[in-house]
Image (cartoon, grey):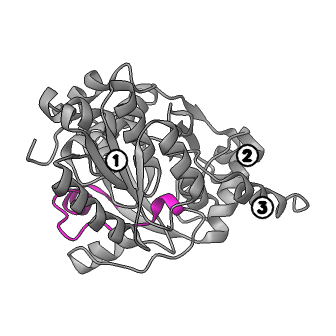
Amino acid sequence: MNHCPTLRDVYIARGRITGLVRRTPFVESPALSKATAGEVFLKLECLQCTGSFKVRGASNRILSLSEAEKKRGVATFSTGNHGKAVAYVAGRLGIPAVVCLSEHVPAYRARLIEEYGARVHVEGHSQDEAESAYYGLVEERRLVSVVPFDDPFVIAGQGTLALEMLEDVPDLDTVLVPLSGGGLLAGVALAIKSVHPGARVVGVSAERSPVMLESLRAGKPVRMDEKDTLADSLLGGIGDDNRYTLEMIRDLVDDHVVVTEEEIEGGMVFAFRNHSLVIEGAAAVGIAALLAGKVDIHGKKAGILLSGSSVEERRYLEVLNRHVNTR
């Protein structure tokens, strides 16, 4: 596939990845509905088989490879969740895999990737530098690329979760989606706008890593220094040669909001207190945006994507402990 994906590609992806990917629950949040005067539903990709939505896109890309390509092996670069998804799928299919990480990726994520059977290669101080190392490995070893976001198969795979959302709640008015490289937001926006054109799609960026948002403003990919953030899955650039996600998000997404570290932390705590859900910072940005009043859903039905649950135990407990006596 050398073109921007279509709704047909999303449906093909759904059929292809069945068996490797869970259909996750899409449940109402009475607490958020009360707080926002709307009806709020949570798409629980934090309960996905690898703990993240990323397995959808990785499965669709790897399952589309020829037998000869599978024998060569696959490689990717990642902030953690995509690497884990590639390692999981490759391991299930008996395909060799290498995952390139930067030094900023937490060690626990590297360990999880290795547990799925992939080889981890750590190099560089940012995802852009890890990506450069990945290109060298791909060329040197003739490995097949499975990129994290800017790939039509990956985008179509991520869009499958939006089909599930619309099947469960057909009359959604608004969908809030975490935004980093844009594979998730592009896929969700494609599916939502194709099936339900009147729905509003909102991208939610972390204040310390709004790379796609700045790229949209510049009209081209930009690079930003990576800063420590609770939403570490949203770190990284969009690629200097971005071919798909920048254009799709520009054309399909209605609004963008940015949330602070304090708001992200509040979203994580809210999910735990009200739903007994452990979610990572990146997964909390939609809740954060609603609680901060940055998206008005009064009288409307809204869906929030809780994208993953990969959070370091120590850091998560630190977040909860700061709020123990604030109820």
Quarter of the C terminus within the rendering: bottom right
Q: Can residue 76 be seen in this view?
A: yes
Question: Which residue position is annotated with label 1?
Answer: 98
Distance between mark 3 and mark 2 Cα atoms = 13 Å
Asked which secondary structure carries label 2, the reply is helix
* Amino acid at dot 1: Val
Looking at the picture, how far across and down is residue 244, in whole percent? 18, 56
Question: Which residue position is annotated with label 3?
Answer: 318
Whichever of callouts 1 and 3 sits on the residue coming sooner in the sequence is: 1
Residue sticking out furthest to the top:
19
Residue sticking out furthest to the left:
2
Question: Which residue position is annotated with label 2?
Answer: 272
Q: In the rendered view, tell whether residue 133 sits above or below residue 120.
A: below
Q: Is residue 174 visible?
A: no
Tag nearer the camera, 1 or 3: 1
Distance between mark 1 and mark 3 Cα atoms = 32 Å
Looking at the picture, how far across and down is residue 46, in whole percent? 56, 40
Asked which secondary structure carries label 1, the reply is strand
